[in-house]
């Protein structure tokens, strides 16, 4: 037996009847009770073996960070800290590092040192009252806390039956109060803290426990205080900072903190860094103050030591998906490939926020099987990293584990769940996808009636409020969308989603001859373009098609009188609106008052061109806004040969139009009102080897009011940046700006006042 294996086997203390507890470890597959390398890798990371030990070509990978000990005196009471350092009372993932004849003196010294950091005291929390406790009770048992922690409600949970497939996990049970062995027990931990500290901790647990093993539940301050009140409902008042530290003992504790390598795992601002890791041979043969001594992790379950020994024989590898889901206890809520999901007796606590029969889909977190083939990269990042929630009817919340702990799952899900047999999907915008009114018909009550169950773009469904389908294109991969509609039960067994396309045939034969593929693709196109189209029949108000910009601009691609068949109308909340010609790139129209009536755009693809609803006035000259002239005073070209490249939206929804000169210079053209009578326009050109000219205005008469300010047909143009020069061209005067050749960007910006 090599020294690495000997060290691992030495971790099993014959005098210890408990083991480090990792809630979801039992969820990993075993044959039938023998654990393998996957279990071992989880243990090596969760016990943070790599904080002290480095072994070339072994599975001792970089460990997750341990709890932050700065400001500990305001989170934990001194007597509880002292007791936690007692090797006979410790049963979690921290090794028993203080033992021997002088163990009590060392524990006392470490307590004085750790309590000597005043840190930042949390603000006082309100005194717990009966209403706060009741609210905290409801929150604790509904938002997901009981997925990891013990339920405290009647009816009391019952342990697994003797014939339960997980009955072999009995060695993991810590005490009768742990109920089933699958909980991170709170009842024996609440004496550690007080109401103020626990409230602050629940608001942002990742500050204290950065490894994500206690995630954020997106609590408001009131919710955090209510849950803290409930958990501490039986606590007697005892200030956490009543303990007075002894400077001499604290100094000795500081030395111990370094000597015992506490800072190898824990952050502490005023502690020395640990010495370099000794080689494995020294660790394996030492018998004082290290994890192979007689008082250590106290691993009594031989499955653990055997699994770690197997893992140590394998090369180092990043945590796999099952290993990460085990470490973060995701299996407490989610199922993946037959592993995990809420245990039967806990399922009663998974509920909905509304009084509607949504079935298990409305109350239980979704399966993670094939989630990388289902969700887009943005969809995965939104859920895992940005706290997005698309199921407001589900009481259980998706926790925030911290980006550092879950970001690696995004590419892993996408790669591991690739589906080579996914159905071909054409959502290119060609052929019947050119317009989305076919999908609109299918979505409404004159088609498949999807809106009977589903919300759509914020509009309530006609029945139960299932997930808003407008969120689909940003989250769901088109191939999964098609596969799901073709056979919902194959991807979500037990789903209430009807099979509209049984055996590949549509239940609505009146469109595309009942072709299921074309109908599903039309639905996708409609959802993708929902922001610039009308709601389906049965959901919209058929009497009014006026678009009214309220909080954000509205961008509508349409056929428009005075612009053409490739117009992009932009309505602003300020009551000033413009239209851009995407065929011959330029701003073409401006008007004030009402924005536009979209009936002609939405009702019939062959309907007359839309018209502005307000008062149109002339602000923009005909022809291309940018030109590469032979000389500055050359005649302005009549033909617009610029190439449209799309548009981008900034944070408030204002578009910036992108186009390109024949020479390949990129133009960024942005226009936005500052109030009901001002427009500000900025035209920016990318790098280019020649001068570019910008046509700002053209009129029969142009007056220079003062330097940088001009009067044109009753409007005033003021240069904000850059310079402009009037040029007489016979019957008209043109106001031109010139952007010199540059290896970087160059721009001109002006305001228009009428």
Image (tube, rainbow, N blue to C red):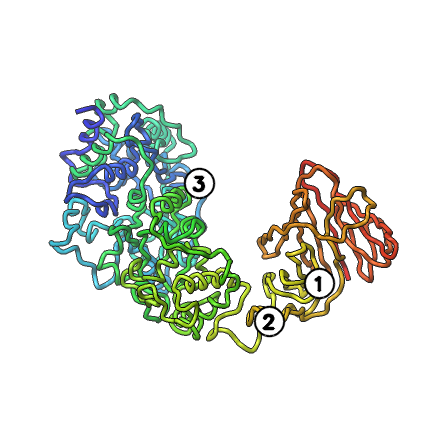
Q: In this view of the protein, which residue sits in the foreground, 576 or 52?
A: 576
Mark 3–mark 1 Cα distance, whole angstroms, equals 59 Å
Residue position for label 3: 119
Q: Do the residues labelled 3 and 2 touch (CB within 8 Å)?
A: no
**Precedes in sequence: disc 3 or disc 2:** 3
At horizontal 32% and vertical 52% (from top left) the residue drawn is 368
Element at badge 1? Answer: strand
Query: How far is disc 2 from disc 1 in space, using C-alphas?
Result: 23 Å
Q: Which of marks 3 and 1 is nearer the N terminus?
A: 3
Residue 570 visible in rendering = no
Question: In the rendering, at what x and y percent does residue 188 appear?
Answer: 25, 49
Whether residue 176 can be seen here: yes
Residue mark closest to the camera, 3 vs 2: 2
Q: Residue furthest left?
A: 162
Q: How crowded is mark 1: few (under 14 residues within 10 Å), some or many (20 or more)?
A: many
User: Which element type, helix, strand or loop, lies under badge 2?
Assistant: loop
Q: Is residue 705 left or right of residue 1?
A: right
The percent coordinates of residue 408 (x first, y second) are: 39, 42
On the image, the x and y values in percent for residue 663 come to 68, 42
Q: Where does label 2 land, which residue?
A: 607
Residue 58: where, in percent of width, then height? 28, 29
Which mark's residue is nearer the viewer, 3 or 1? 1
Q: How crowded is mark 2: few (under 14 residues within 10 Å), some or many (20 or more)?
A: few
For mark 3, give the secondary structure. Answer: loop
Q: Which of 449 and 456 is in front in this view?
A: 449
Number of other residues with Cα within 10 Å of mark 3, as a class: few under 14, some 14 to 19, many 20 or more? some
Report the residue marked by disc 1: 590
Pick the quarter of the image with the N terminus. top left
For marks 2 and 1 on the same chain, the one whose residue lies earlier in the sequence: 1
């Amino acid at each position: 037996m090599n020294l690495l294996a000997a060290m691992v086997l030495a971790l099993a203390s014959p005098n210890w009847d408990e083991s480090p507890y990792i809630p979801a470890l039992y969820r990993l597959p075993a044959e039938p009770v023998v654990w393998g390398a996957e279990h071992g890798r989880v243990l090596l990371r969760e016990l943070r073996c790599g904080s002290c030990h480095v072994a070339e070509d072994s599975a001792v990978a970089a460990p997750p960070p341990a709890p932050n000990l700065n400001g500990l005196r305001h989170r934990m009471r001194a007597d509880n800290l002292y007791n936690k350092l007692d090797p006979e009372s410790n049963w979690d993932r921290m090794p028993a590092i203080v033992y021997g004849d002088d163990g009590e003196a060392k524990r006392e010294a470490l307590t004085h040192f750790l309590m000597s950091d005043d840190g930042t005291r949390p603000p006082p929390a309100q005194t717990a009252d009966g209403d706060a406790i009741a609210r905290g009770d409801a929150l604790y048992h509904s938002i997901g806390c009981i997925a990891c922690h013990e339920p405290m409600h009647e009816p009391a949970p019952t342990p697994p039956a003797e014939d339960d497939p997980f009955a072999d996990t009995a060695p993991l049970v810590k005490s009768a109060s742990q109920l089933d062995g699958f909980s991170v027990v709170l009842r024996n931990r609440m004496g550690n803290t007080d109401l103020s500290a626990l409230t602050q901790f629940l608001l942002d647990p990742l500050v204290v426990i950065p490894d994500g093993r206690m995630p954020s539940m997106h609590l408001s301050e009131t919710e955090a205080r209510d849950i803290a009140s409930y958990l501490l409902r039986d606590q007697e008042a005892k200030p956490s900072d009543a303990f007075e530290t002894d400077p001499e003992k604290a100094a000795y504790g500081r030395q111990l903190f370094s000597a015992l390598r506490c800072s190898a795992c824990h952050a502490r601002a005023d502690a020395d860094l640990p010495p370099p890791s000794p080689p494995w041979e020294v660790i394996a043969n030492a018998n004082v103050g290290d994890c192979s001594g007689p008082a250590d992790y106290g691993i009594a379950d031989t499955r653990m030591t055997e699994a770690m020994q197997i893992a140590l024989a394998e090369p180092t590898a990043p945590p796999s998906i099952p290993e990460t889901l085990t470490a973060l206890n995701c299996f407490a809520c989610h199922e993946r490939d037959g592993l995990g999901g809420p245990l039967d007796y806990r399922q009663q606590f998974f509920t909905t926020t509304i009084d509607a029969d949504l079935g298990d889909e409305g109350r239980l977190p979704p399966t993670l099987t094939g989630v990388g083939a289902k969700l887009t990269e943005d969809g995965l990042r939104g859920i895992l990293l940005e706290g997005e929630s698309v199921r407001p009817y589900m009481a259980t919340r998706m926790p925030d584990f911290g980006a550092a702990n879950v970001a690696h799952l995004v590419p892993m899900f996408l790669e591991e769940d690739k589906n080579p047999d996914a159905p071909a999907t054409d959502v290119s915008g060609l052929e019947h996808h050119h317009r989305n009114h076919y999908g609109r018909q299918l979505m409404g009550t004159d088609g498949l009636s999807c809106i009977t169950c589903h919300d759509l773009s914020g509009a309530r469904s006609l029945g139960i409020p299932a997930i808003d389908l407008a969120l689909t294109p940003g989250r769901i991969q088109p191939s999964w969308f098609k596969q799901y509609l073709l056979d919902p039960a194959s991807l979500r067994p037990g789903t209430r989603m009807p099979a509209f396309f049984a055996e590949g045939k549509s239940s609505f034969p009146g469109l595309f001859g009942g072709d299921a593929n074309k109908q599903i693709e039309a639905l996708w196109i409609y959802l993708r373009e929902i922001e610039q189209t009308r709601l389906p029949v049965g959901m919209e108000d058929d009497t009014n098609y006026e678009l009214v910009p309220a909080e954000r601009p509205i961008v509508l691609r349409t056929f428009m009188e005075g612009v053409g068949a490739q117009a992009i109308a932009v309505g602003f909340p300020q009551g000033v609106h413009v239209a851009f010609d995407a065929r011959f790139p330029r701003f073409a129209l401006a008007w004030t008052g009402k924005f536009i009536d979209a009936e002609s755009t939405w009702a019939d693809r062959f309907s007359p061109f839309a018209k502005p609803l307000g008062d149109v006035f002339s602000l923009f000259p005909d022809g291309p806004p940018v030109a590469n002239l032979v000389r500055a005073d050359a005649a302005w070209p009549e033909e617009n040969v610029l190439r449209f490249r799309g548009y981008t939206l900034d944070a408030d929804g204002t578009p910036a139009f992108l186009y390109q000169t024949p020479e390949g210079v990129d133009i960024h053209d942005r226009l936005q009102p500052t109030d009901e009578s001002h427009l500000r326009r900025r035209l920016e050109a990318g790098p280019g080897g020649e001068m570019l000219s910008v046509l700002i205005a053209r009129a029969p008469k142009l007056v220079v009011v003062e330097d940088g300010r001009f009067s044109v047909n009753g409007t005033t143009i003021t240069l904000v940046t850059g310079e402009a020069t009037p040029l007489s061209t016979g019957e008209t005067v043109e106001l031109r700006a010139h952007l010199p050749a540059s290896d970087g960007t160059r721009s001109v910006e002006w305001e228009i006042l009428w």
